[in-house]
Amino acid sequence: MSGELDAQQAAIVAAGRAALADIQQASGEATAAVVRVIEAQTGVTLAAPPGPSIMDATRQQLMDADRRARAAVAAMDIVLRQWHWGDAQTLGQLMPDLPEHVREAVADHLVQAGQS
């Protein structure tokens, strides 16, 4: 398969990525729930199993991680370096106080980073 995707293939890839992100989120939530239950019932805190080694990452996975990291840095550059937080304690509290175009830029970066 060549590097160029048609619109239908791009939509399939996007849907696949979204499905994988949903699976990863659900898995993380399920893991956290197991840890909480065991801790509540026994007082023992289980360590979550480690993820795959970075040394097993493919070039494409590294490129995707780089893209997500750059988008996350762009969002943090806005909210941490360009705006004053005032009384806000969380990003969720800060966002409504930002101008609409800034909120949209931050949200776009967070989506690209896989954080929203």
Image (tube, rainbow, N blue to C red):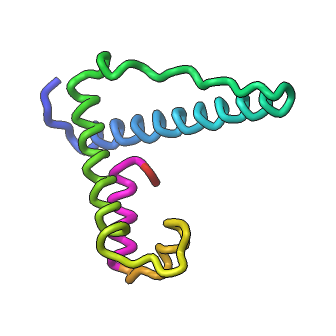
Q: Is residue 86 above or below residue 37?
A: below
Image-based side of 79 in relation to 70, left or right: right
- What percent of the width, then of the height, locates residue 39? 78, 30
- What percent of the width, then of the height, locates residue 98? 41, 80
- What percent of the width, then of the height, locates residue 34? 73, 29
Query: Which one is nearer the viewer's eye here, 58 or 1?
Result: 58
- Span of residues in magenta: 101-114
The residue that appears at 63% across and 37% down in the rendered structure is 29
Quarter of image, res 87: bottom right
Q: Is residue 17 above or below residue 38?
A: below
Image-based side of 16 in relation to 82, left or right: right
- What is the magenta segment's predominant secondary structure? helix
Q: Quadrant of the N terminus?
A: top left
Q: Is residue 54 magenta?
A: no
The residue that appears at 35% across and 49% down in the rendered structure is 113
- What percent of the width, then of the height, locates residue 101? 33, 78
Quarter of image, res 46: top right
Q: Is residue 111 magenta?
A: yes
Quarter of image, res 48: top right
